[in-house]
Image (cartoon, helix red, strand yellow):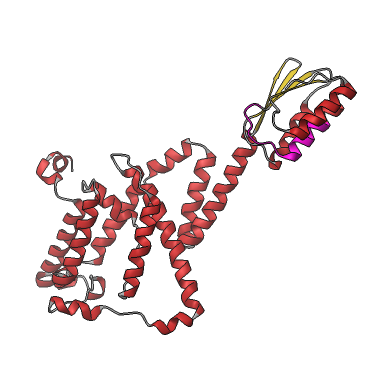
Amino acid sequence: MPWFKKQALLKLIPGPLITVAWGVAFNLWATRFAPAWQVNSEHMVTLPVQEHPADFVSNLIFPDWSYLSHPQVYISAVTIAIIASLETLLSLEATDKLDPMKRLTPTNRELKAQGVGNIISGLLGGLPMTAVIVRSSANINAGGKTSLSCFVHGVFLFTSTLFFTQYLNHIPLSCLAAILLYTGYKLVKPALFKEHYKKGMSQFLPFVITVIAIIATDLLKGMAIGMAIGLFFVIRANYHAAISMVKNDHHYEIVLNKDVSFLNKALLRKFILMIEENSSVTIDAHKAQFIDHDILETIEDFIASALDNNITVETVDLIGKEKMKKHLDLIVLDNSIPVSR
């Protein structure tokens, strides 16, 4: 293997092409000299053979418009649209990471092109199409860098179905399976699991659970499970990151780091209960763009009761919360607690 990799000429030959060529050559040899080793016809590529290029038109099947009145048609169409769109977006995300030039694919344009293509394909009796990471990664590994490679790929497929189906039918399915397995292995090799593990459980668990869910169910259900798990970790991370508290001797600093919703009320109450008597507290909100009403009320209640425990409260940048300012002014007048804004 190292010797092959060092040869500049051999680097120009894609590995999958060698796999297919070897499979075809071996099966032809086995058919003639070792019939016991030949691949059975049910395990070979099976494409309709065209006697003439014009025969291609006879394979087109146009829609039966009477089925538009069947509800099952719309259920299937929506299901296919969701699955195809999800697979395309996932493939684009993975392809952008594999791209050596680190370009970003315009997702909206890709989905629009896919929608137009699927409409035309359906009108001609074809199957729905979607972006596929296996072919995209194979394209990148073969040295493709522009959209021209994708166009040439389509031209080759079209030409092959017109003129070379009798030769393509000599390809054993096991060769294509080997290519898919190897490509899939490179996409989810053990190093990728190690990389996610090093990022922490918040990254590793959604990744592993999504992979297992897709294998155990199907792509749509697996993605739904993965999104639910990912959403849980996002909410969990935001829950802990929104509010933080630092203690220095008898002084506490509660910082509202970003938008604080009602989900963070329990965490704020937890920090307040940790504040000891005869201490001082600074509530810093200069980083927060939004503070939920429940959070404001919790702060108001804390300030109102702080005097009973000889706790001095100072607030920073609670600007734009008119109700909060009004309540703080009343509390300052009634309890003489120093409050700054």
Q: Is residue 188 visible?
A: no
Task: State how many labels appear.
Answer: 0
Q: Who is closer to the viewer here, 234 or 118?
A: 118
- Most extreme residue toward the top, as rendered? 249
Q: Is residue 34 magenta?
A: no
Residue in view at x 87 percent, y 23 percent: 333
Relative to 125, does residue 20 appear above or below in the rendering? above
Q: Who is closer to the viewer here, 305 or 182?
A: 305
Q: Is residue 298 magenta?
A: yes
The stretch in magenta equals 286-301
> Which quadrant would the N terminus be assigned to in this image?
top left
For residue 289, what is the image quadrant?
A: top right
Residue in view at x 47 percent, y 67 percent: 79
Is residue 281 shown left or right of residue 142?
right
Q: Position of residue 269 (x, y in %)?
A: 76, 34
Is residue 319 shown left or right of residue 309?
left
Q: Who is closer to the viewer here, 146 or 8?
A: 146
Q: Is residue 252 visible?
A: yes
For residue 171, what is the image quadrant?
A: bottom left
Q: Position of residue 207 (x, y in %)?
A: 48, 47
Relative to 249, does residue 232 appear above or below in the rendering? below
Is residue 214 shown left or right of residue 106?
right
> Which quadrant would the C terminus be assigned to in this image?
top right
Q: Position of residue 95 (x, y in %)?
A: 34, 48
Q: Position of residue 288 (x, y in %)?
A: 64, 31
Relative to 165, does residue 179 appear above or below in the rendering? above
